[in-house]
Amino acid sequence: MIHTSEILDTLRMIDREKLDVRTITMGISLFPCVSDDVGVLCRRVYDRITRKAERLVAVGEEIEREFGVPIVNKRISVTPAALISGGIDNPLPLARALDDAAAQTGVDFIGGYTALVQKGMTAADRRLIESIPEALSTTRFLCSSVNVASTRAGIDMDAVALLGQAIKKTAVLTRDNDGLGCAKFVAFANAVEDNPFMAGAFHGPGEGDAAISVGVSGPGVVKRALESVRGEPFDIVAETVKRTAFRITRVGQLVAREASRRLETPFGIVDLSLAPTPAVGDSVAEILEEMGLEVCGTHGTTAALALLNDAVKKGGVMASSHVGGLSGAFIPVSEDIGMIRAAEKGALTLDKLEAMTCVCSVGLDMIAVPGDTPAETISAIIADEAAIGVINNKTTAVRIIPAPGKNVGDSVEFGGLLGRAPVMPVHNFSSEAFIRRGGRIPAPLNSLKN
């Protein structure tokens, strides 16, 4: 039962504190579409997506109007493309069919041009990875991801090496837009099957025919709540974040249930992540600074982020029957005005961000680096981040943009939710011999839990 006080709290959070539902994402299984005829496969994929998601955008807009809750994005995620494209020689027609289906349904993005290669690559996986640069440079709505590692399997370093090359090629092919294609690609360790957030969303093979999942945001709400407990001990800070996360997640649960009912599609999960935007007052960095840090990135930042992430999970899990996805705090540099300021001041470095990813929900997100950064360095950054995920049994990710023609001190402009990223320095020492070894970094001992 929802009480009047909750309704009033929600209205205040929306009106003054930038609360929104960041996305309603419909996950769709494409296993019924499998064919070794590329034309048949693409036609079945297009027809299935446009039929299942025909009303997704309209229903999202109806809920916005009726409930007064902003819903920023409507998205689709699908079965990892490499799992259904094994019978065809070239996955690019499938990429374009997915993009065409997204355009027809009117969604903002479609995710699932994906391969799961944590223990090795099939021929279909390799073909998909090698096609990523062209796929992302010739489509508008398509997002791609590759899971290169898991705690159970270790790290597939052959795949990691391929991804460094693919990211560099994607940047070059989209150089007229500051390497925008790279912003639509994520390398994962321990990827989850029900993530509603782009660019890493896909509908996992363990999911059903379809599902509705919702990603909730609200950094501004948490920031405003912490302003009322300035100077109080961290016990009070944690309790305040927990209570606030509960209220935010209740909004997501309501929207998810209503969308599920109207679309006649099973409810999947609520992802209660704090996802920032470039707007002032909607920043995870500003939450950390409200805890007493002069600038995000200074000493104490990792501890503050650990508290925030843990408290968000504890508060949110009590508010929804099914919490999933990534759920916690995101730290995408280009999408968070506080992170942008901190990076420009030199307080937030790539090394500090890597440390922060040990305790946050994802990883190195929307990081711009110099355009001449070697592919092997990018692969090594992915390997480092994957190692954090594997050892700590958590999801980590890398979304990195080697900005063509840009150097440290420059910035790239993507606009919208993707924002603006200052180009950050990387180490100049080579990782080439390390990456060239290939093979697989074995799973850690803590993976043996049977």
Image (spheres, rainbow, N blue to C red):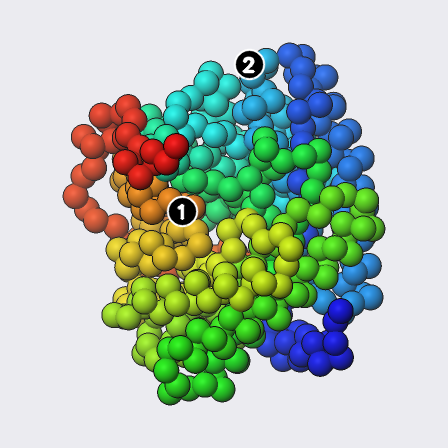
Please tell me whether residue 242 is drawn above or below residue 413 in the rendered image: below
Of callouts 2 and 1, which one flags the residue occurring earlier in the amino acid sequence? Answer: 2
Please tell me whether residue 120 is drawn above or below residue 137 in the rendered image: above
Disc 2/disc 1 C-alpha distance (Å): 34 Å
Estimate how packed mark 1 is, as few (under 14), some (14 to 19) or many (20 or more) residues with alpha carbons within 10 Å.
many
Rendered-image quadrant of the C terminus: top left
194 relative position to 104: left or right: left
| Nearer to me, 195 or 425 | 195
- Residue 216 screen position, x and y as percent: 61, 60
- The label number, if any, that marks residue 89 in the structure image: 2
Q: Quadrant of residue 86?
A: top right
Estimate how packed mark 2 is, as few (under 14), some (14 to 19) or many (20 or more) residues with alpha carbons within 10 Å.
some
Q: Mark 1: which amino acid?
A: Lys
Rendered-image quadrant of the N terminus: bottom right
Q: Residue at x 48, y 47 (%)?
A: 183
Tell me the element at label 2: loop
- Residue 58 screen position, x and y as percent: 81, 52
| Nearer to me, 10 or 141 | 10
**Which residue is disc 1 drawn over?**
394
- Residue 390 screen position, x and y as percent: 34, 41
- Residue 414 screen position, x and y as percent: 51, 55
Q: Report the mark closest to the observer, 2 or 1.
A: 1
Q: Residue at x 33, y 50 (%)?
A: 369
Q: Mark 2: which amino acid?
A: Asp
Q: Residue at x 48, y 23 (%)?
A: 125
